[in-house]
Amino acid sequence: MIKAVRFSKYGDISVLRVAEVEMRSPAANEVVVQVRAAGINPGEAKIRQGLLHKRFPSTFPSGEGSDLAGTVAAIGAEVSEWAVGDDVLGWTWERSSHAEQVVVPADQLVAKPAGLSWEAAGSLYVVGCTAYAAVRAVDPTDADTVAVSGAAGGVGTIVVQLLRLRGARVIAIASDRHADWLQAHGATVVNYGDGLEARIRAAAPDGVTAFIDLYGPEYVYLAVALGVARDRINTIAAFDTATELGVKAEGSGAATTTDVLAEMAELAATGKIEVPIAATYPLEEVREAFAELEQGHTLGKIVLIP
């Protein structure tokens, strides 16, 4: 038996609980990971609230969590690439990483670099692969000025840094409270709210050449209003609007590979990018963790530590 997060109906954080559940044995191609850290994500809150029922329905009782990092505790009969005691990070599709242990297909794990903290490793999959896909979708160079909405969030902080690694100038749309971090990582910060288009035009008098939306439809319309070519607009948050306007909507699904995750882990381990950790919580305080997340103003990632 292990402790794992469960919820038995859609609702607010009050439906979350930590339960004793039976741990299944790994199949031939699976690995049991003793979880050391597991990030939480806005999408998980929306799934639990029932807001994504049509796209991602839940069956109850439901677990949650896709990000994970930990140590291999057992392997299936046909697994040769991992051994008990290996440190790994990866993902699960079974909504099950917010737990003491998780069973994961062996090909959904990569080796954790020694220089990468458990907190960063355990929160890297969703934000790392999503940011990689979003940046790749607009294909920036050092000749570009790229605007990013939601720039201080978990994905946004990684997007900003990947853009800077490509040499692009970054217009980070965020609040004043996170301006210092964004400026220290090479971005020009523009506050969101009324008058945003004018402020962006003032900050980028030669124009914005690409736009990455990490927040919602209003920013996709803004990108079009700024004259950005539609094939250089990417959203991870406004799929219907993307279809309506003919812009890209590439997110984690477009870059979910172990090659991408290993590349992101190496960038983080060597200090080329930072994975900012806003807070850590023990598994038993999962409600408190999501309460902080759902305020919507954290810089970077919130992580559960089983």
Image: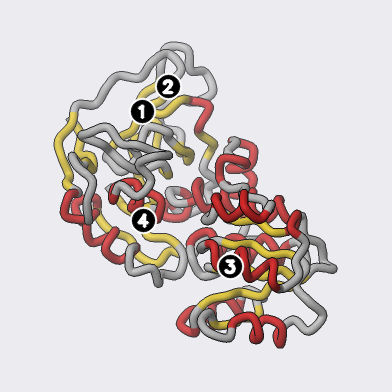
Circle 1 sits on which residue? 103
Label 1 element class: strand
What residue is at 23 percent from the left and 61 percent from the top?
A: 288
Residue located 69% across and 66% down the image: 224
Side of 2 relative to 248 (left or right): left
Spatial CA span between label 3 and label 2 = 41 Å
Asked if residue 159 is positioned above or below residue 60 in the image, the reply reads below
Residue 27 falls in image quadrant? top left
Proximity of marks 4 and 3: CB atoms separated by less than 8 Å:
no
Instruction: Give neighbour class at mark 2: few <14, some 14-19, many 20+ (Cα, 10 Å).
Output: many
Residue 287: give x, y in percent of width and height: 22, 57
| Residue nearest the observer in this picture, 298 or 244 | 244
Q: Badge 4 is on which residue? A: 303
The amino acid on which the numbered mark 2 sits, given as a three-letter code, is Glu
Marks 1 and 3: which is nearer the front? 3
Q: Secondary structure at mark 4?
A: strand
Say which amino acid is labelled 3. Tyr
Q: Earlier in the sequence, mark 2 or mark 1?
A: 2
Mark 3 lies on residue? 219
Image position, residue 199 (x, y; %): 64, 86
**Quick check: 173 above or below 167?**
below
Query: Quadrant location of residue 295?
Result: bottom left
Counting residues from the start of the chain, the first of labels 4 and 3 encountered is 3
Disc 2 secondary structure class: strand
Instruction: From the image, tell me which residue sits under label 2.
Output: 30
Give above or below for 175 relative to 274. Answer: below
- Disc 4 residue type (three-letter): Val
CB atoms of marks 1 and 4 within 8 Å: no
Which is nearer the N-term, disc 2 or disc 4? 2
Amino acid type at image mark 1:
Val
In the rendered structure, the answer to whether residue 222 lies left or right of residue 51 reads right
